[in-house]
Image (cartoon, rainbow, N blue to C red):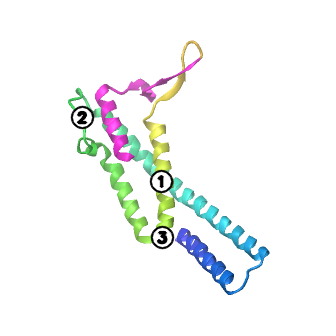
């Protein structure tokens, strides 16, 4: 995987720099060049992690939309505190896909690369949640924006659906 190669190159460069510093006094110019290359590789690792995570956005978005559909099927009233088990059926598809992707990444990715990918995937997941599930600002009659907990088509969440959504967000955290 390209991300692993970038990370390994960074580590090898760092080891080379440390070895040069111990064996001989590496010049200021050499030090600057190695530092610049390290920064460049670190930036590329971040950029490529974002590309990989963003490539999963369409799938994650579909999973969040499916989850929204399941939440809108919930009827009734809130009876006590909901648990993770209560919302597991709502999150099943999304968690299955994330788990499968995560397992593959754990198998092939260096630890540092995995950290970056997980961070970027988290941001993609948050973006999908914001797009599909969270309140949207809309102008009201006096020109100010108010938050409406509603979705396209005029749908609004009932109190029990809000409780389920709150528990889903807790699980995702």
Q: Judge depth for marks 1 and 2 and give the one in front.
A: 2
The residue nearer to you, when weighing 168 against 133, is: 168
- Mark 3 burial class by Cα count in 10 Å: few <14, some 14-19, many 20+: some
The tag earlier along the polypeptide, 1 or 2, is: 2
Residue 110 place in picture, x, y as percent: 48, 70
Give me the residue at 39% from left, 46% from top: 173
Q: Are marks 3 and 1 in contact (CB under 8 Å)?
A: no
User: Is 72 drawn above or below residue 100 in the view shown?
Assistant: above
Residue 87, picture quadrant: top left
Residue 142 image-quadrant placement: top right
Magenta residue check for 146? yes
Bin the neighbour count of mark 1 within 10 Å (Cα to Cα): few under 14, some 14-19, many 20 and up.
many
Q: Residue 81 — which label? A: 2
Label 1, label 2: how many angstroms apart (C-alpha)?
29 Å
Residue under the image location 40 percent in, 70 percent down? 107
Residue closest to the far left: 79
Residue at label 1? 121
Tell me: 63 left or right of 117.
left
Which residue is label 3 attached to? Answer: 110
Helix, strand or loop at mark 3:
loop
Q: How many marks?
A: 3
Query: From the viewer's perspective, is residue 154 above or below residue 64?
Result: above
Callout 2: SS: loop
**Magenta-highlighted residues:** 144-173
Between circles 3 and 1, the one closer to the viewer is 3
Please determine whether, in this image, residue 14 is positioned above or below residue 43: below
Q: Residue at x 47, y 64 (%)?
A: 114
């Amino acid at each position: 995987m390209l991300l692993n190669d970038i990370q390994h190159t960074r580590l090898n460069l760092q080891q080379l720099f440390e070895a040069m510093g111990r064996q001989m006094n590496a010049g200021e110019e050499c030090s600057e060049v190695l530092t610049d290359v390290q920064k460049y590789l670190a930036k590329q690792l971040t950029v490529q992690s974002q590309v990989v995570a963003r490539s999963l956005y369409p799938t994650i978005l579909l999973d969040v939309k499916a989850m929204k559909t399941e939440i809108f099927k919930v009827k009734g009233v809130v009876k006590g505190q909901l648990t993770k088990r209560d919302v597991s059926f709502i999150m099943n598809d999304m968690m299955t896909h994330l788990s499968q992707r995560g397992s593959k990444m754990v198998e092939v990715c260096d630890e540092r690369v995995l950290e970056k990918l997980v961070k970027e995937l988290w941001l993609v997941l948050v973006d999908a949640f914001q797009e599909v599930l969270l309140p949207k600002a809309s102008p009201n009659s006096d020109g100010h924006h108010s938050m409406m907990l509603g979705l396209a088509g005029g749908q609004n969440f009932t109190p029990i659906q809000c409780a389920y959504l709150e528990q889903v967000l807790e699980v995702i955290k």
